[in-house]
Amino acid sequence: CVSMASMFSARPAPLQATIARTMPAARCHAASRSLRAATTKARGLKDASDMCAFMNNCRSPFVQTQCARSCYSSVVHQANARPLLSPRDNLVPRASSNPSVAASGGEYDYDVVIIGCGVGGHGAALHAVSQGLKVGVIGGHDVGGTCVNRGCVPSKALLAAAGELHKLKSKDHMAALGIETGSLNFDRQKIADHANNLASTIQTNLRRSLEALGVDVIFGKGTIKDQNTVEVGLPGRVDIEGTVTAKNIIIATGSVPATPPGIEIDNDRVFTSDKALKLESLPEWIAIIGSGYIGLEFADVYTALGVQVTLIEAMPTLMPGFDAEIRRLAQRVLVDGRKTVDYHTNVFATRVTPTTFGGVEIELTDASTREVKDVLEVDAVMVATGRRPYTEGLGLENLDIDLLRGGFIPVNDKMQVTDKDGNVMENVYAIGDANGKYMLAHAASAQGISAIENIQGRENVVNHRNVPAACFTHPEISFVGVDEETARNEAEEGGYADKIGVAKVSFKGNSKALAMKEPDGLAKMIYRKDTGEILGMHIMGIHSADLIHEASNAMTAGQTLYELRMMVHAHPTVAEVLDELFKHAQLEHVTNPAPAMAMA
């Protein structure tokens, strides 16, 4: 054990301050009474001795040391305005702030260790604590992961500014509301600061939520040594090293931007979304390679900020993966309807080269003939061609597994990792972008919760078809389930082709959308006429990212259109679009036939 007294006496003041600043993650929680004691003039450190009661079942000196440093940091922070407190030799840290939980009977440091502290790891940790498990999360240097620090959170801050600018720049839109607008200016740096500040705020909130529940947030990166042991370190930091053990390990390391062959990222004129989110400058003309979620959202941001945008897509159409009808409407509104956007489809960017004149030259090769089709010269290039799992240094070679195509970790439906022979590792799980099943932050969280359920012996499988997705352009696009083409193909194979129904409702007939002068939108639902089951829903229009949850939750709960069409929606709201959609369904029965069929 590392005593608190030795930390006070043995370390020179500058090093003590360094520890207080740099070791905040492996927390050693203190009761509020003890924290107040630490800041009371009349009391010395002896009364703070109950701040940390070391867990007898902790077998890891690394955990002990990190908790000692964190506890020391906490005391220094609380008492920095007070007279120096007298050290007490018997003040020792504990490995976990949840002393009521013994990790796996004392055999391991933790019941669950989660490698990665993004949205997926956070969701898994919170659920694990709710189940009475002792939890450690490795990744305190990057709380929030990609989503919070380099992805969906800061991008929404940029999109919020873009949305306001799109409205104000549309004089016809504002005039229709009776508002006259003059010259319009914006401060690029303040917009960037808003994104950075938001990411910092959410990161702090996530860390505090973990700490408040007694989760040990361990500073560093994890390398798996075997199915129960994780080595912790951080490149360039010799003071961060050690080992923790756990009955179960969850891999939640997320992903990084993927770059096609022939493209070299210099983070100056050629960059990915990681760099673009910082909004350090605004080129006059930017080419965005890829027209999926990331490419579309950044095209929305850049056009609002006055940048000329060229979309480059390898597939025959823009926005591949979207429902065909929604895709056509989105292209009309988001691309063709904006004078500062053009595009090239069915081409590869086979060569991207910064020029000596401050621009970037892009060689476009026809995806069908493989012949060079065109050469563009723009001011900057953003690569938005998807993401790849981040598993470098994770130690997967020690688990004897073969990664899937793209570098994804193979897992079964319960999120358990499988080795190269297909054998299931009962206590090792991989969630989120690391397994590639559905690369969305909220899907990672759902998988993390599912993993904990399976750890607890309650079989749980995430139905990814019921997980909603959204693109936060203006207007937004969202969907859940399958598109019409997929639904019809599956019905043909399953012998129920005549049971497929499609309902559509335009936003042009919605009172709230008309009041807001936001009539561009369409909601489309694919369903079964016999059972009333929703197979898919696709929406483009204002607030569609919020509306989609009514469908996704209904699908998850097993609700059918027989029930949904009887539900009431407030008037006037955009949600009435879905009310109309449910009522438009042409069902074969007046009431749900399922109960009668079950009785028979």
Image (cartoon, rainbow, N blue to C red):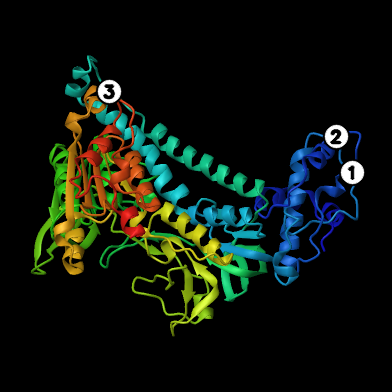
Residue beneath disc 2: 40
Quarter assignment of residue 75: top right
- In this rendering, the label closer to the viewer, 3 or 2: 2
Residue at 60% in and 45% down: 209
**Structural distance between the alpha carbons of marks 2 and 1:** 10 Å
> Upstream in the sequence, badge 3 or badge 2?
2
Of the residues shown, which amino acid type is indicated by label 3? Leu
> Upstream in the sequence, badge 2 or badge 1?
2
Q: Is residue 111 above or below residue 129?
A: below
Q: Is residue 301 visible?
A: yes
Q: In the rendered view, does 372 fall on the left or right side of 522?
A: left
Residue beneath disc 1: 47
Residue at 90% in and 55% down: 90
Residue beneath disc 3: 184
Within-10-Å neighbours for mark 1: few <14, some 14–19, many 20+: some
Q: Is residue 150 above or below residue 579?
A: below
Per the image, label 3 sits on a secondary structure element best described as: loop
Of the residues shown, which amino acid type is indicated by label 1? Asp
Q: Is residue 330 visible?
A: no
Of the residues shown, which amino acid type is indicated by label 2? Thr
Instruction: Compare residues 303 and 318 and report the one nearer the observer.
Output: 318
Labels 2 & 1 near each other (Cβ < 8 A): yes
Within-10-Å neighbours for mark 2: few <14, some 14–19, many 20+: some
Pinpoint residue 254: horizontal percent, then vertical percent. Answer: 45, 60
Q: Is residue 230 above or below residue 334?
A: below
Residue at 82% in and 55% down: 53
